[in-house]
Amino acid sequence: MDTQRSRFVGTVIALACLAGLVCHSAWAAPPAAASSAADSYTGPTLIRSTDATADTPPAKPANDSDGSGRWLMEMVNPDTPLAERRKIFAIFEHDAEMGDYYKQYLVGSIYRLGEQGAVPIVPQDLAKARRYLSNAAVNGYELAMAKMAELELADHHPLDAMVWAQIYGYYTGVFDAKTPRGKTSYYAELVYRISKWLPKKQMPTVVDDLNQFIANYDTHVRACSKAIEEHYSRQSLARTYAPSRADHADSSLPSGTADYVIAFRPDGTAAQAWLLDAVPTPEVGHSMHEIAIRSRVTPDPGTKTLRYASMPVTFISGRYRTP
């Protein structure tokens, strides 16, 4: 671990100059106020059993028999009445408070965008988004790390944004030759956007905070990531075809990943897809609906109903690369 960490630290310092190593983009982050040198990432406030509320969970929707997969679909379906979407969201938030890793990721994603989300459910609340997404990140959800970086950049905290970007890069292995190009392309673009607002003199702080995060959470993050992978590998909804978009007519779109809730037929083909969230912008997700609908999962001839799952789709602009 020490050798691996030292290698990454050397890389992250070099990335302070990433703007000179990547192609120029017309897309830019909104102006951000510079962080002071004293501002330093303090790490997530973890949700533990002692933090969980003891209140009785909200009443479940009438369609309880179909499970949370169907609830998730109904929550992101714009045809579902807002009152019902919020009722389902309240259930998910309670589960997140009780320590459900995926619900932390889901609820944090929804709070991050608020009214700007694909299907608005609750007002934007960055404090709650930080709480849930940072917990989801520690609990093995790599995309939660990226969303934390995007959240902090949008909230004018480039130092914190860079720390989370490097955490994301570390756990997705962006400098490993075997890492999917989609992850490296998005990472390079994310770091480029942040570096425009972060003074180079703050990079040593980024390195210190990255190493502190690794020291505090590495064992837990990796154990949770492995458990998540093993869980999904046992599901009947295991993906057999994952579409991606290597290029796009709209060259202004940045690289990114979108979360969709997809309804699958018994033969494994997709019947419908609803956008949940996307990084760095919802526009990336809106542009890829026809790509998402081409997803395939393991057939289940024994069922006669639709099956629902949350799945990501990656967009690669091809304009950015890691050094």
Image: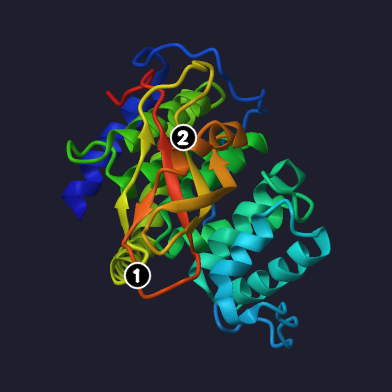
Give the percent coordinates (x, y) of residue 306.
Answer: 50, 65
Residue 13 shows in this picture: yes
- The residue that appears at 26% across and 34% down in the rendered structure is 10
Q: Quadrant of the N terminus?
A: bottom left
Query: Is 183 on the left or on the right of 79, as rendered?
Result: left
User: At label 1, which amino acid type do we have?
Assistant: Pro
**What SS does tag 1 mark?**
loop
In the foreground, 272 or 81: 272
User: At label 2, which amino acid type do we have?
Assistant: Gly
Dot 2 alpha-carbon crowd within 10 angstroms: few under 14, some 14 to 19, many 20 or more = many
In the foreground, 19 or 319: 319
Dot 1 alpha-carbon crowd within 10 angstroms: few under 14, some 14 to 19, many 20 or more = few
In the foreground, 34 or 128: 128
Residue 46 shows in this picture: no
**What SS does tag 2 mark?**
strand
Give the percent coordinates (x, y) of residue 260.
Answer: 52, 49
Give the percent coordinates (x, y) of residue 147.
Answer: 53, 46
Q: Which residue, given by chain and number where applicable, does mark 2 sit on?
A: 256
Residue 301: mark: 1
Q: Quadrant of residue 175?
A: top left
Query: Is 201 on the left or on the right of 233, as rendered?
Result: right
- The residue that appears at 57% across and 76% down in the rendered structure is 66
- The residue that appears at 59% across and 82% down in the rendered structure is 65
180 over 82 or under it: above or below: above
Q: Quadrant of residue 168?
A: top left
What is the distance, in whole Å, between disc 2 and disc 1 at their CAs?
34 Å
Give the percent coordinates (x, y) of residue 268.
Answer: 37, 58
- The residue that appears at 16% across and 48% down in the rendered structure is 3
In the image as oriented, which residue stretches furthest toward the right? 83
- For discs 2 and 1, the disc positioned in front in the rendered view: 1
